Image (tube, rainbow, N blue to C red):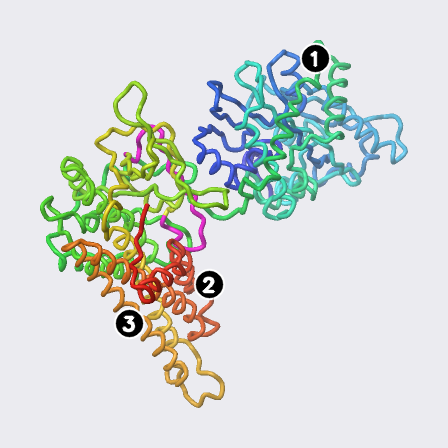
């Protein structure tokens, strides 16, 4: 059996390169996008273009050493910032039924080698001849060398890989054998009816150079963007050494070949050969190659090779890699929208939103939505499938306009109803349940401090199906007190303001039409800027990788010189200048989410025990759900869940009371009851989602059930606002009669 050569996979490139490895591992593109650095990349090319802090566009390339030396000889302005050396396996291929068996049989044989369109073509043939001569000398043959045949293309560049050209010549009997510095996997050889010459298998070092250039302009100073990129490459190569199997898998993907082909083409130590550190040994080989190319007329003129090496970038990059500032690659499955944005059609083609008329209609819409999203909840979590269709449906059903005041056309549901809706949706899917929390938080912000014009505009946006994301939290390497670093400043010489900063944990921002962003003005006052999702300077990055709430898209928002008109700026600090229930309103929705997840976990546990759990040995019952100890445990969990729900309802009523009659007393009671409920809900939800496995038994932990999502979702979500602090807030009241006040 044989196949056509064209059926073989054609490699995208000759060698796996460090740039693509770092990019594939994830942290490189995330880090660059977080910093607002535009990147242009062709996968597998070993090239990357970035817009640096200067006006210049920098290009990084991984190229054969001979190509780089020729570019330097032509006086191109390049800086060498890395060297990569890999061992590639070289063989001689013959027909399966050929008389040629060993190196001794090559006497007088026609040995083909493809002519390549590279500056080191003649060197390649010389190196190949040396290897063959050495093999012949080992078997005692000093004369009657094989006849080398250079295999030319019909065109100067016919697009045919040299390895294929060699195979075609062999299969058409133009030559007796071919020299291949890129060996074929065993299966491909068998299908083509070929085999390797016995006793000839060598590993040839291949040197690749990483360079940076700026369109022919001399780079005067080290670029921080390039240093950051090089540091990521260093961390990626370290990762490869510790993860050889996965590194080889990524290399195969990069080359466009099967994973099984890697050991036939490269050394088994390929995973150790992906780094670009400039060692003395690698540099000596580059210097020797330059001399060899000059001696054989492959380079015209001379140039100071040492001056092209940018040691400052190398040193700074290594310091950055060692600092711990950069995230080390984890090779986890992350969203495809970490590199690019959602399609515009997701935002522009949403169906018209229904306008709810009151609490009961809102509850019915929530029940309908929950039934629709429940069946796919586990699969979405397991595969981190973003709920794009479900989020559109949330808007279509009118569930984004719940707290819009009646005077502006909204249902203005009670806090008790809002809590019930969050429980209903989170019971079906805890991740989707969390997404609209910040949306309602900012609708309430507009209600409390927005002008009439702002209320009229934004409330109509919401009732028409627009969703608010959020830009509240920030990450920092500092271990000190939290501080907002995002700034909003008056635009010099123009009307309006300019917004700059980085936000994280931006739940819902990826799906939203508007992103409300918290920032400090010149007077260090907290402001909220409502920014269009696709405004110039806004980058939304789905780099959320938490163990739970996996489809909330709680990643990053990067803001670079974003223009904000005064009509989209609200004085958030004014909410806290007197008694307020706003903090309690924001926190109670979080508590409702956790209750909904806990309800689902307890129901799943009960269903599993009834259907699958075997009774304990010696229990004396035939079914697990008849065991007295299990019945007792479910009683404990059920009572705690009911108690948490009752306290949550009481807290919702306290908020509604404060809304109708706001003063220090009503605001204090609202904060007290919400803090109490938040603590009890957290403790109860964590206990129930953990106890699921305790009561259901070992088989409930099979991955196919994915019950651990309940615990993962609750565990990570309850960290939003540490419950341990609530005990102190509540304790101050019961001991000293002092209500806790939330201040900004």
Badge 2, how many Cα within 10 Å: few under 14, some, many 20+?
Answer: few
Nearest the eye: 543 or 727: 727
Residue 374 seen in this snapshot: no
* Residue identified by numbered label 1: 303
Badge 1, how many Cα within 10 Å: few under 14, some, many 20+?
Answer: some
Q: Quadrant of residue 118?
A: top right
Disc ID at residue 238: none
N-terminal of the pair, mark 3 or mark 1, is 1
Q: Tell me the magenta residue range.
A: 532-552
Q: Are marks 2 and 3 in contact (CB under 8 Å)?
A: no
Disc ID at residue 703: 2
Disc ID at residue 642: 3
Vertical position of residue 297 compared to residue 57: above or below: above
Residue at x 17% of width, y 57% of height: 414
The spot of residue 530 in percent (x, y) is 27, 36
Residue at x 19% of width, y 54% of height: 663
The spot of residue 287 in percent (x, y) is 74, 21
């Amino acid at each position: 059996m044989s196949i056509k050569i064209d059926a073989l996979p054609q490699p995208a490139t000759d060698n796996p390169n460090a740039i693509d490895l770092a990019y594939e591992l994830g942290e490189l593109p995330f880090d660059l996008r977080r910093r607002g650095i535009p990147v242009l990349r062709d996968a597998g090319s070993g090239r990357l273009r970035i817009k640096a802090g200067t006006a210049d566009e920098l290009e990084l390339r991984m190229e054969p050493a001979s190509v780089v030396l020729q570019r330097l000889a032509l006086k191109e302005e390049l800086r060498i910032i890395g060297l990569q050396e890999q061992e590639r396996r070289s063989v001689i291929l013959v027909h399966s039924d050929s008389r040629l068996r060993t190196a001794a049989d090559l006497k007088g044989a026609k040995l083909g080698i493809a002519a390549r369109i590279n500056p080191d073509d003649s060197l390649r043939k010389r190196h190949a001849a040396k290897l063959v001569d050495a093999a012949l000398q080992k078997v005692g043959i000093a004369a009657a060398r094989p006849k080398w045949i250079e295999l030319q293309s019909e065109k100067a560049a016919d697009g045919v890989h040299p390895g294929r050209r060699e195979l075609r010549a062999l299969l058409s009997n133009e030559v007796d054998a071919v020299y291949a510095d890129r060996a074929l996997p065993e299966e491909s050889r068998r299908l083509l009816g070929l085999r390797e010459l016995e006793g000839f298998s060598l590993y040839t070092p291949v040197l690749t150079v990483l360079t940076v250039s700026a369109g022919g302009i001399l780079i005067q100073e080290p670029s921080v963007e390039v240093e950051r990129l090089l540091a990521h490459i260093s961390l990626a190569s370290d990762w490869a050494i510790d993860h050889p199997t996965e590194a080889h898998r990524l290399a195969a993907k990069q080359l466009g070949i099967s994973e099984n082909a890697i050991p036939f083409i490269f050394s088994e130590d390929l995973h150790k050969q992906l780094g670009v550190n400039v060692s003395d040994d690698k540099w000596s080989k580059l210097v020797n190659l330059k001399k060899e190319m000059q001696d054989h007329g492959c380079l015209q003129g001379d140039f100071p090779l040492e001056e092209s090496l940018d040691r400052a970038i190398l040193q700074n990059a290594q310091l950055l890699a060692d600092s711990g500032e950069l995230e080390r690659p984890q090779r986890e499955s992350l969203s495809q929208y970490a590199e690019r944005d959602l399609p515009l059609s997701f935002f522009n083609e949403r169906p018209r939103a229904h306008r709810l008329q009151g609490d009961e209609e809102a509850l019915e819409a929530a029940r309908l939505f929950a039934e629709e999203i429940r069946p796919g909840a586990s699969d979405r979590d397991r595969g981190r499938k973003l709920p794009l269709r479900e989020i559109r449906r949330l808007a279509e059903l009118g569930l984004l306009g719940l707290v819009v005041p009646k005077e502006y056309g909204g249902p203005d549901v009670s806090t008790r109803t809002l809590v019930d809706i969050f429980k209903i949706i989170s019971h079906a899917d805890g991740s989707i349940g969390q997404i609209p929390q910040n949306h309602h938080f900012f609708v309430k912000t507009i209600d409390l401090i927005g002008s009439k014009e702002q209320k009229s505009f934004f409330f109509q946006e919401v009732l028409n199906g627009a969703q608010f994301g959020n830009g509240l939290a920030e990450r920092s390497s500092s271990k000190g007190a939290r501080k907002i670093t995002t700034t909003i400043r008056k635009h010099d010489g123009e009307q309006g303001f300019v917004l700059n900063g980085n936000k994280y944990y931006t739940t819902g921002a990826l799906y939203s039409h508007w992103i409300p962003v918290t920032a400090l003005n010149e007077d260090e006052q907290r402001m909220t800027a409502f920014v269009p999702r696709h405004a110039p300077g806004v980058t939304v990055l789905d780099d959320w990788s938490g163990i739970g709430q996996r489809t909330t898209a709680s990643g990053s928002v990067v803001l670079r010189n974003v223009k904000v008109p005064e009509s989209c700026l609200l004085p958030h600090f004014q909410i806290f200048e007197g008694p307020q229930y706003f903090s309690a309103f924001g926190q109670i929705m979080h508590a409702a989410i956790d209750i909904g997840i806990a309800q689902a976990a307890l129901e799943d546990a009960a269903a599993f025990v009834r259907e699958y759990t075997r009774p304990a040995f010696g229990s004396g019952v035939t079914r697990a759900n008849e065991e007295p100890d299990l019945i007792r445990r479910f009683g404990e969990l059920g009572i705690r869940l009911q108690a948490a729900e009752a306290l949550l309802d009481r807290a919702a009523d306290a908020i509604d009371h404060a809304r109708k009659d706001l003063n220090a007393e009503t605001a204090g009671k609202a904060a007290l009851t919400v803090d109490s409920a938040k603590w009890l809900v957290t403790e109860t939800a964590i206990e129930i989602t953990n106890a699921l496995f305790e009561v259901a038994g070992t088989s409930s932990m099979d991955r196919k059930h994915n019950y651990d999502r309940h615990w993962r979702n609750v565990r990570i979500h309850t960290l939003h606002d540490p419950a341990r602090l609530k005990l102190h807030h509540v304790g101050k009241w019961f001991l000293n009669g002092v209500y806790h006040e939330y201040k900004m």
